[in-house]
Image (spheres, rainbow, N blue to C red):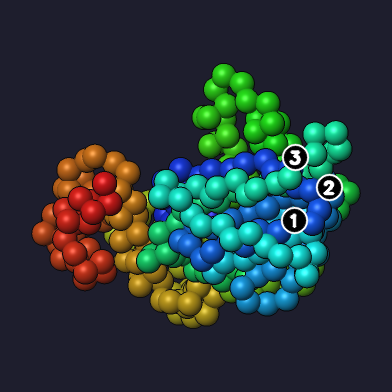
């Protein structure tokens, strides 16, 4: 997988969920802080997203917002509208807020809302660097793939058919990647000078090294070999990598191996020796020692807690 896909897969836990909501003005709902990340799409009408930190953002038809940090936020038809408190259920879903029945009138707003459960203990910096609110305004011709995914998801939620459960889950995974890709591309095109991880992925040399590490974390990488992949001298590569990624090359390699190991332990029922091999360790003992240093518990204990 590529770096963006890997970063998302490393944090994702459980099943994502979504719903299509018809709202009649005045309407408002406040989502409490959680381990999840949420998105909202305005299919019809308008509203405001009011983050826990930062200024409110006005939303119009077709706008997409993504709130990555789980600090809580409100969504309302106006800034002075009372909001209903929404509390996360035990299964990770949000309850449907009350809405007055107005069968004879169309809703003032139609919203597509969803959430992803995330493991924030080992968050990839590509996601932690996101702003409080990622706002993708509707623009003619912009982000066509994202718009197509939104339309498909909205259709499946409005008119469920056989297979919709699987289709919705896949579309939610796809939508998250499209949102992140759109934000990254917007940052590159609007500023011309991306920073942080956007700059790392926009740098051909560093991106080549990152893709190599993510494609084969078990390889015994050296700074020299990664520099060769990047087309740079050892010293020049090490300096540029540390500047853009935020840590030295081999420190990142070790960190990514541990993130990969955690995902394998959570998601795959394979022996620890295979987890060790897939993450570049020649012995189960060496792997267990490195894992305990990073996570504070033995691999077997981590697996039991995650099951």
Looking at the image, tell me whether mark 2 or mark 1 is earlier in sequence order: 1
Neighbour tally class for label 1: few under 14, some 14-19, many 20 plus, Cα within 10 Å: many
Q: In this view of the protein, which residue sits in the foreground, 5 or 43?
A: 43
Q: Residue at x 86, y 37 (%)?
A: 105
Q: In this view of the protein, which residue sits in the foreground, 184 or 50?
A: 50
Residue 259, quarter of picture: bottom left
Q: Residue at x 11, y 59 (%)?
A: 285
- Badge 2 marks a residue whose secondary structure is loop
Is residue 50 shown left or right of residue 220? right
Viewer-nearest of discs 3 and 1: 3
In the displayed structure, 282 sits above or below 231; it is above
In the displayed structure, 105 sits above or below 188; it is above
Q: Is residue 145 visible?
A: no
Residue 56, quarter of picture: bottom right
Mark 1 and mark 2 in contact (Cβ < 8 Å)?
yes
Q: Which residue is mark 2?
A: 108
Looking at the image, tell me whether mark 3 or mark 1 is earlier in sequence order: 1
Q: Which residue is mark 1?
A: 27
Rounded to the nearest angstrom, the CA distance separating label 3 from label 2 is 12 Å
Viewer-nearest of discs 3 and 2: 3
Q: Residue at x 69, y 68 (%)?
A: 50
Q: Which residue is mark 3?
A: 101
């Amino acid at each position: 997988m590529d770096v963006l896909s890997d970063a998302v897969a490393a944090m994702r836990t459980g099943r994502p969920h979504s719903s299509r909501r018809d709202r009649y003005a005045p309407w408002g709902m406040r989502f409490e802080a959680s381990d999840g990340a949420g998105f909202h799409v305005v299919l019809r009408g308008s509203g405001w997203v009011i983050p826990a930190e930062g200024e409110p953002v006005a939303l119009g038809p077709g706008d997409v917002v993504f709130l990555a940090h789980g600090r809580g936020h409100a969504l309302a038809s106006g800034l002075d509208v009372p909001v209903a408190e929404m509390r996360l259920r035990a299964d990770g879903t949000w309850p449907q807020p009350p809405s007055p029945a107005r069968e004879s009138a169309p809703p003032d707003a139609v919203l597509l809302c969803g959430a992803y459960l995330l493991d924030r203990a080992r968050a990839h910096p590509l996601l932690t660097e996101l702003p409080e609110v990622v706002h993708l305004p509707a623009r003619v011709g912009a982000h066509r793939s994202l718009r197509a995914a939104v339309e498909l998801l909205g259709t499946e939620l409005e008119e469920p058919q056989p297979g919709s459960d699987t289709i919705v889950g896949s579309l939610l995974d796809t939508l998250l990647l499209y949102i992140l890709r759109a934000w990254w591309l917007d940052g590159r095109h609007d500023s011309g000078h991306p920073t942080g991880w956007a700059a790392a992925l926009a740098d051909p040399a560093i991106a080549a090294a990152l893709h190599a590490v993510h494609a084969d974390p078990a390889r015994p990488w050296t700074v020299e070999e990664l520099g060769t992949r990047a087309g740079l001298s050892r010293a020049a590569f090490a300096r540029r990598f540390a500047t853009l990624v935020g840590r030295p090359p081999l420190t990142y390699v070790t960190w990514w191996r541990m993130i990969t190991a955690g995902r394998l332990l959570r998601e795959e029922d394979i022996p620890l020796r295979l987890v060790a091999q897939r993450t570049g360790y020649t012995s189960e003992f060496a792997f267990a020692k490195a894992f305990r240093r990073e996570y504070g518990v033995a691999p077997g204990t981590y697996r039991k807690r995650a099951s």
